[in-house]
Image (spheres, rainbow, N blue to C red):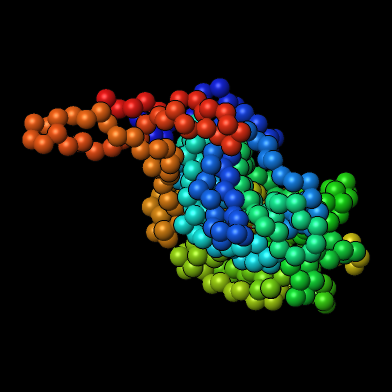
Amino acid sequence: MVFPPAPLETIGWNKLGLSIQDSVNGHVESKYSVATGEWSEPEFVADPYLRVHGLAPALNYGQQAYEGLKAHRGPDGNILLYRAEAHADRMAVSASYVSIPEIPRAHWLKCVKLAVARNAEWVAPHSSEALLYIRPLVFGSSGHLSLTAPTEYTFAVYCQPGTTYHGVQPLPACVIEDFDRAAPRGTGGAKVGGNYAPVIRHTDRARAQGFHVTLHLDAQTRTCIEEFSTSGFIGIKKIGESVLVVVPDSKNIVQSITSDSCLELARSYGWKVEKREIPWSECKFFDEVIAVGTAASLLPIKLLARPSTGEKFVYGETVGECTLKLATGLRNIMRGKIADEFGWVSVVEEKDLLLPVVEKAPLTNGVNGELNGAVYGNSDNLTNGNGIHLPAEVQVEA
Ligand SMILES: *Cc1c(COP(=O)(O)O)cnc(C)c1O
């Protein structure tokens, strides 16, 4: 068999946006049982729906954590996963905030690679602007009313094709002032669902006022930058020929892997990097501000507005040169266009399909009739979680 398969030919890859494609091949599920203390072998389920008890703590108490990462197709047609280990480690941190047992890194990677490998034809052509967005989520899934640990947890991995727009026009952002996303010593550092739903009505209101991006200040003093609602904050100052990149250092923000990548790139360009408190008042001195995250990539900020004070710091209508250099550098690594000197990219391989190994028909080799190895192949008992037989995906090699 040839892995990976070519991208589907019937998809308008550059027009996907964020709409949900239920026609992808399926998702991965693995369950943790408190009784055994183990995560089950991953199963590929040819269906977007989950069967979850309605009294599961995930639905009632928000016992849930998630991740978001990406895969792209390289110039040779291979599928490249971006910084999967870092996302595995961050999910372990998020899960610990909401008392969910850790998913061992190797198991996490196995489940994520399985989801990508089985949806490989949904990874867009190298030439397109599209990517495969991967959404791992973990939650308490057994029916359980008391505020104690349930007996079962589910880890699921979904894949969705999507499009990002490289070099988008800068967007206006505003500070949200009548709501705090995260309290000091709270859960702001975790990618847990409960941090996001309360923000929706505030971002909706800001968007209605023309602000596409929203910024949160620290809850305790309202004087320092924390992060944008779904992405990290980067400020850039140019002093003559030298460039200074500043990112907030706070326990109440999600540690952005995109931001970390930008800092590493910046260092490699010989730029200066500072991770520290950023007073709101410093924002007027930045030459470029970027909102950074896996989904949005690098989104240049046109202006930062603070309605209560009337302040408005303007960075301009065009993409700044430092933003463009970082965005291009990152994009080239993710898409395999340039050498990955950081070790961030891993290739999804045929073995990640986890297809059962079947033994080849015995070939007498004239000596002792040994089997000459094993190959991946179809198995009649390869079913999905609903007992539905999966389509024959591979041919047994002759
Ligand atoms: C996911 C997320 C980010 C960005 O993290 P990346 O690893 O860069 O995708 C930043 N802030 C918040 C609130 C997030 O949820």
**Residue 106 location, x and y as percent?**
46, 57
Kindly identify the residue that appears in the image at 44 percent across and 28 percent down: 380
Q: Is residue 208 visible?
A: yes
Q: Which of the two residues, 218 or 191, is positioned nearer the viewer here?
A: 191
**Residue 147 location, x and y as percent?**
79, 64
Q: Which quarter shows the C terminus? A: top left
Q: Which of the two residues, 223 or 99, is positioned nearer the viewer here?
A: 99
Ligand 1 lies in which image quarter? bottom right
Q: Which of the two residues, 220 or 55, is positioned nearer the viewer here?
A: 55
Q: Is residue 300 left or right of residue 321?
A: right
Q: Quadrant of residue 132?
A: top right
Kindly identify the residue that appears in the image at 50 percent across and 65 percent down: 264
Q: Is residue 259 visible?
A: no
Q: Is residue 241 left or right of residue 164?
A: left
Count numbered badges in the picture: 0
Kindly identify the residue that appears in the image at 41 percent across and 58 percent down: 343
Kindly identify the residue that appears in the image at 68 percent across and 37 percent down: 49
**Residue 9 location, x and y as percent?**
51, 23
**Residue 102 location, x and y as percent?**
58, 63
Q: Is residue 74 above or below residue 252?
A: above
Q: Which quarter shows the N terminus? A: top left
Q: Residue furthest front?
A: 35
Q: Residue furthest left?
A: 367
